[in-house]
Image (tube, coloured by chain):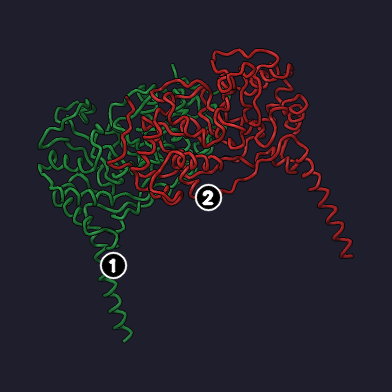
Chain colours: A red, B green
Amino acid sequence: MLIRTFVISLLSLGSIFVPAIALAADEPIQPIKEVKPKNPDMVELGKMLFFDPRLSKSGFISCNSCHNLSMGGTDNLQTSIGHKWQQGPINSPTVLNSSMNLAQFWDGRAKDLKEQAGGPIANPKEMAFTHELTVSVLSSIPQYQARFKKLFVTDKIDMGMVTTAIAAFEETLVTPDSRFDKWLKGDKQALSQTELEGYKLFKESGCTGCHNGAAVGGGSFQKFGIFETYKTMNKAEGRFAVTGNDDDRFVFKVPTLRNVELTYPYFHDGAVETLEEAVDTMGRIELSRKFTKEENAKIVAFLKSLTGKQPELTLPILPPSTKGTPKPKPFE
Amino acid sequence: MLIRTFVISLLSLGSIFVPAIALAADEPIQPIKEVKPKNPDMVELGKMLFFDPRLSKSGFISCNSCHNLSMGGTDNLQTSIGHKWQQGPINSPTVLNSSMNLAQFWDGRAKDLKEQAGGPIANPKEMAFTHELTVSVLSSIPQYQARFKKLFVTDKIDMGMVTTAIAAFEETLVTPDSRFDKWLKGDKQALSQTELEGYKLFKESGCTGCHNGAAVGGGSFQKFGIFETYKTMNKAEGRFAVTGNDDDRFVFKVPTLRNVELTYPYFHDGAVETLEEAVDTMGRIELSRKFTKEENAKIVAFLKSLTGKQPELTLPILPPSTKGTPKPKPFE
């Protein structure tokens, strides 16, 4: 009797869990895994640096200005605002789940988050600072000095340490537990019928050809405008800027669709405000498919189920500057 | 015997604690009290609004941009950066402990935090938005709508509700438990000999004539430049702008000295970078006293003991805009 009950229990468990696991493995999208930081002190230092506007010439712009963690890791602007209110050339991609990208920036010119992190700091149109001054600022502040010393066992801060710490923080910025992920993991109640139909359409139409994996994108470079040229005022030419190869014109990194409800406006030029229009455009120019209004609504409903648990962050308290700290120069 | 022990115990207790309590009451500075929010939901809404850049025309500037809670509630700039990188007319005062001020802004033109909060939003040199658009933005976002409805029991958001919520959040931004407050409460080890001597000098020289109370300032308007004219390029004339009274020229609200180590640069023109220089100037122009280098160092040491426990805040997650949300116009 005991044995029989045990067997039945196993079978009933099986009927709930086994197909769910099998299902997730068969799907083109995988759930996002929680990240347990290997080195919490490194992550904390990276968070401080991410929020510190003293990494800009003006003392006003931090990483968080354009990758705002209150707003899906973006600034929700068409293109970003840089030093002296310069208009950025391209839409700021989300920092959320960005560790899953095959490379960083829309054109993939940085191989990873560490390489990316140094870019905007020294870009005259963005934070307009220099790596030398970044190191001088941090070296002049005893509390930063002590943190770097503890982590890197040296008295001499360098830019490699700065970007290592920022990247370590960014690697923790993942968004698990979206309703879609709950569904993937077997909770069949997590999605509505409309959302499920949207997902089915998303797969069958070929969207998952590029938007796949845990990040639902970020895994490949693709031509933007396969069946139809994408009309834009934006001058970015994508991978061509990196490779010089004519075939790479208008080839961009496929953006993640995780939290896409929060990361408007859309595309590298940030020209599209709504998911409805983004889905319509993608169908037309990438798949040569005109979605009906009903199909469009279903796909949009599915996309909104990709909003995950946003990182819960305690605002860092930054140590004060000292007499030796290079002063911000906002109006020079 | 029991009675005798009891009496002795009381006496020994007295020798430790009674003078401490008496001391705090006799001092011109009182400890900051912790704030227990009366309405946590109101505070949470206020925090969201404080961090939401959609309360600016550009969608880029929030209250936290210039009153950065990672940096002592200031931007640590001489004068702030506003819409389209306009240079602000005056140094941004800290939002920390600002509920204790007798009025808000350097010239006290707003009677309280609620009245203050609407100012920068609509100031064309700061957030450059309008109150009408603020209400339209918030009304277009269902999650904001629901929060206002729950708190104000109405479907119609108005600016009074917005500023009520922001003020409620700001009232929680107090910084208790500084080393100086621990000393005031009886922990005689909390201050070093130098800091104590600095405090003695601070009192005896007359600094506490204006810098007193729990906020060590904020309780009165005073002429800036009593014994000597303060030389500045800054055009602000203080209370005169509010009252039109000639006697009010260069009369400003006395700033709080709580967390003054974090709120550099100093004075309404933000022209002074170091506490040493600030103390020297204040001695000269307000007290006709030239502090020696040693005296100056002692007062500065005391001032640094006023840095309290900074508010520990979870970064708010802001709800996304909708199709009905007025779009930010950063470059118009």
Residue found 76% across the figure and 24% down from its top: A205
The part of the image, by quadrant, that contains residue B241 is top left
In this picture, residue A70 sits left or right of residue B110? right
- Residue at 60% of width from left, 46% of height from top? A35
Task: Return the mark for residue B67.
Answer: none
Q: Residue at x 57, y 22 (%)?
A: A268
Q: Which kind of residue does numbered mark 1 sit on?
A: Phe
The x, y position of residue A103, in whole percent, is: 59, 32
The label on residue A39 is 2
Q: Position of residue A44 (x, y in %)?
A: 48, 46
Res. B17 mark: 1
- Judging from the image, what secondary structure is the residue with disc 1 in? helix
Badge 2 crowding class, 10 Å Cα cut-off, few under 14, some 14 to 19, many 20 or more, is: few
Q: Nearer the viewer, mark 1 or mark 2?
A: 2
How many numbered discs, if any? 2
How far across and how far down the image is residue A161, in percent?
A: 46, 42
Q: Nearer the viewer, residue B206 or A182?
A: A182
Q: Looking at the picture, how far across and down is residue B90, in whole percent? A: 28, 29
Does A87 sit above or below residue A328?
above
